[in-house]
Image (cartoon, grey):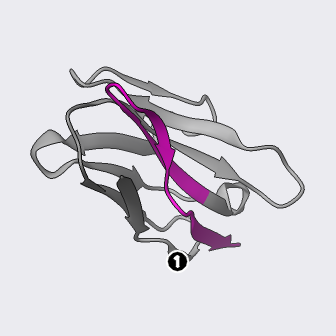
Amino acid sequence: QVQLVESGGGWVQAGGSLRLSCAASGTIVSINAMGWYRQAPEKQREVVASIGRGGTTTYADSVKGRFTISRDNAKNTVYLQMNSLKPDDTAVYYCVMNFWGVGDYWGQGTQVSVSS
């Protein structure tokens, strides 16, 4: 069984920064892609960023230049550095990891609130 535990959410004023972390534990053979999604109130869940095992990254247009995704394969952890935060970034952020031979697992979600 695999578990993903997120941390780092909170409240921040516009222009501020937060760093999210998501660590996987359990029986892990290999982790392929890792990513972050978010869901704002009354909106659909949307992809924020993803990173392949080799480090290739993709970003939603709305966060390009402000957010940076990274991973530590030795720690089975993915990070999301969020800078220049805007009120529109307010959402619950979820990490997701694709485990070899098993499929996708999701974190429990962490709230990010940005005030103007």
**Can you give x and y, in whole percent of width and height, for residue 15 in the image?**
53, 64
**Can you give x and y, in whole percent of width and height, for residue 33 in the image?**
37, 28
17 shown above or below 47: below
Residue 19 seen in render: no
Q: Nearer the viewer, residue 109 or 20?
A: 109
- Left or right? Give the position of 43 relative to 88: right
- Left or right? Give the position of 25 relative to 97: left
Residue wearing tag 1? 10
Q: Is residue 94 magenta?
A: yes
Amino acid at circle 1: Gly
Q: Nearer the viewer, residue 16 or 113?
A: 113
Tell me the residue at 23%/42% (across/down).
Answer: 28
Where does the C terminus fall, quadrant-wise?
Answer: bottom right
**Can you give x and y, in whole percent of width and height, for residue 48 in the image?**
56, 39
Q: Main secondary structure of the magenta part?
A: strand
The region drawn magenta spans 93-116
